[in-house]
Image (cartoon, rainbow, N blue to C red):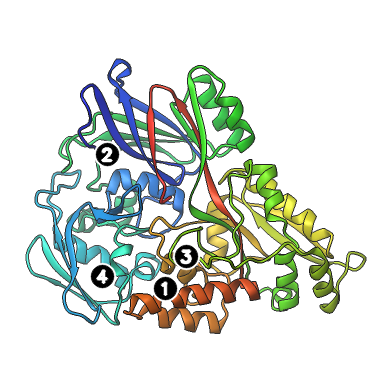
Amino acid sequence: MLASGPPGRRKLAALAGCALLALTVPAHAAKDSLTIAYPVDVPSWDPTSNTVPGAQSIYKSVFDSPLQYSPDLKLSPRLISEWHFDGTDGTRLAITLRDGILFHDGSTLTTEDLKYSFLDRPAHDPTILIRRMLPPIKTIEIQSPTKAVLVFNVPSPAAPIYLGFLAAYILPKAYIEKVGEDGFKQHPIGAGPYRLASYERGARIVLQAFDQYWGGEAKIKRVTFQVVTDPLARVAAVEAGRADLASQLPLREIARLATLPRVTATAFPYSEVYMLQMPNYVSALIDENVRVAMSLAIDKAAISKAFYGSFALPISVLATPGSPSDVPGFKIPFDRARALALMKAAGFSPEHPLTLPMISTNGAFPNDFEMARAIAAMWKQIGLQVEIQEVPLTKYVDMNHSATLPGPALYSWSNPTADPENTTGKILDGALPFSAWKGQEATDRVHALLTQVDETKRMQGYRDLNKDAAEHAWSIALLQSVFSMAYNKDLNVVPYTGG
């Protein structure tokens, strides 16, 4: 992830929080190590078995990715140097790997490893989520060590986007077969710019530059991710100089940190949404009156002003403003009076409230728990009494994937591709573990769009689905996410706004 820069500059592309960042160190402040105060740990060292967004930062450093999205959301080469559809029906994707890619043990990465990672290994282990992230693969035709064709069971026009998205990592076949699955997870190797030097679960991840990386050895030799789940502790770490960079900080701290002489602090919207997952296997959420009332009762502008300095834009659909599946002009208003009427129709009121648990993280993204409490207060005014259950991000993921959410769940959904298949297509596809809404109508409509090769019809279909999902509150879009960070002034940080 390194590139040569202007004279006297040293560049490193690394992930921080959930946003890809390019860090530049001026020559006068050149350093061989970097410490990042980071909100989450990796759930495991198998990067193909989970889709926790924050973990991708570390996975990309160790394993690299087949393709990658540039700062302006353009799909660009990484381990794969060329790709195109072979034919017009969208079922055959031809790819070419770069020459000379090495794993950390010195072995060569080939199309055999790609086939093992994307087809063979997931076929034998249904818990490996890459099989549900990629379109259904019929076979992978190996033409040479660097050329192959991915053959899909159905037309898959969006297939390339998944090669730069969650869980799509090429793992070393020979190494895993030698040491076994447990051995690989204990001592993982990849083909990324950094190798894992040491690991203390829940505390510290130390990466060392790989001197045979295909893109050139990283100039910053050692990167330490300090796992700091408390956002105020991350603030303290960068303020005291114990960390060079800290991410996903409370917005109220950004202005104060920006006044410090050694610190740069900033916040900006990016390609991610704050939303409420609505599990329709919870009986209270089957009633559309209740769901729509919950949506109408949320004053998104007030939440943005209170917690995000109005940087986080209120949204009504599962798309960021200006993205392909946004619905310009469409808005779910803040309407407490109508919300009260709908709750009354469902048999509830402030005097006789509906009680329901609510799931929220605390520190997984800026002001998440505070936002949950504000929403709970707004719901109380219409006759919905929620008890907020604070859980770690990994626990939320486990509950969602196992369909055991006890009520609405506040979540931040990252989509670095901006393609709606990676947001609406995942959130509303009831056949997938990422979806809390298991409604058949939404699932059928997503499945039809997955094979729609006419791009105009595909995007219009997602816009229509986004609008219907908002009107029926199959999910509740809240705000465009805000990424916040503070870092040593010796670093020049260029964000990848895809998230």
Q: In the image, what residue occupies the spot 26% across and 47% down? A: 189
Numbered disc in front, either 1 or 4: 1
> Against 98, is 246 above or below?
above
Disc 4 crowd, CA 10 A, few/some/many (<14, 14-19, 20+): many
Which of the image's four quarters has the N terminus?
A: top left
Q: In this view, does 221 lie to the left or right of 370?
A: left
What amino acid is labelled 3 in the image? Thr
What amino acid is labelled 2 in the image? Tyr
What amino acid is labelled 1 in the image? Met
Numbered disc in front, either 3 or 2: 3
Q: Which of disc 3 and disc 1 is earlier in sequence? A: 3
Helix or strand or loop: what does disc 2 sit on? strand
Per the image, the residue denoted by label 4 is 119
> Against 31, is 303 above or below?
below
Quarter-of-image position of residue 194: top left
Q: Residue furthest right?
A: 351
Q: Which of disc 2 and disc 1 is earlier in sequence? A: 2
Q: Nearer the viewer, residue 285 or 470?
A: 470
Numbered disc in front, either 1 or 2: 1
Give the percent coordinates (x, y) of residue 137: 27, 75
Give the percent coordinates (x, y) of residue 200: 43, 37
State how far apart marks 1 and 2 are (Cα): 38 Å
Residue 423, numbered label: 3
Per the image, the residue denoted by label 2 is 194
Per the image, the residue denoted by label 1 is 459
Give the percent coordinates (x, y) of residue 146: 10, 60
Numbered disc in front, either 1 or 3: 1
Q: Which of disc 2 and disc 3 is earlier in sequence? A: 2
State how far apart marks 1 and 3 are (Cα): 13 Å
State how far apart marks 3 and 2 are (Cα): 30 Å
